[in-house]
Amino acid sequence: MSRWEPNARTRLERASLELFVERGYDNTTVAEIAERAGLTKRTFFRHFADKREVLFGGQEILSRLFTEAIAGAPASATPLETIAAALAAVAPIFNLDRFELVLRRQEVIAAHTDLQERELLKAATLTAVMAEGFRARGLADLAAGVAAELGQLAFRTAFFRWVASGGREFVHIAKEVVADLQTAAELVTTGQ
């Protein structure tokens, strides 16, 4: 493959994950990743700050999509309806083309405590983004925080169900998760 193909980022992601699984995250260098992808180290660093960011580089996209979806939900939407809209907005990211990459990513993260910590930081950042979005919609701080935590629970649950499903459409799984959370919330509030 040519060094200058426009899909360099995807090639680097695939090469990284292949090497992380084959050799281990700690035993893989940026130079090896670039070589496997048929690119240069310089190209790697144009796309990623370091090899860890290969695993966490989508944070900005998720945050932006959640922010836009929360802001764009109808004024009459409940927080749970707003969460459903946000999950629908991120659904295109979780497609069958990326499914194998996501499985490898999860395998690598599960094997490293420091990467698990980074994953938790990513989740906390996304929760904070959602809380800010709910505050901008007029919810008080506590209510915005609860809605954001519920949003994070919905996202995390939908994500792990998607992974376990073998790649079923994320949007359908997300709808099921929102319905399950609605039922669970009703059980909690009624004490049944």
Image (cartoon, helix red, strand yellow):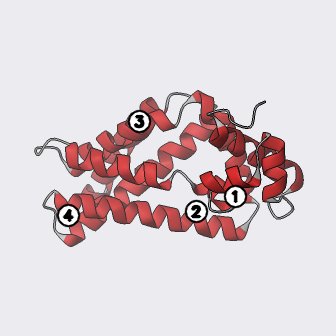
Q: Amino acid at mark 2?
A: Glu
Q: CA distance from mark 4 to mark 2?
A: 24 Å
Residue 112, compared with residue 4, is above or below; it is below
Identify the mark at residue 119; answer none if there is no mark: 2
Disc 4 target residue: 135
Check whether the beta carbons of the residues at disc 3 and disc 4 lie within 8 A of each other: no
Residue 92, compared with residue 106, is above or below; it is above
Count residues near mark 2 (Cα–Cα under 10 Å), then give few for <14, some for 14-19, many for 20+: some
Identify the mark at residue 109; answer none if there is no mark: 1
Q: Amino acid at mark 1?
A: Ile
Helix, strand or loop status at disc 2: helix
Quarter occupied by residue 130:
bottom left
Q: Is residue 116 visible?
A: yes
Instruction: Name the front one of labels 3 and 4.
Output: 4
Image position, residue 45 (x, y; %): 66, 57
Instruction: Name the front one of labels 1 and 3.
Output: 1
Of the image marks 2 and 3, the number of the one nearer the N terminus: 2
Image position, residue 88 (x, y; %): 36, 36
The answer to whether 143 appears left or right of 99 in the picture is: left
Disc 3 target residue: 176
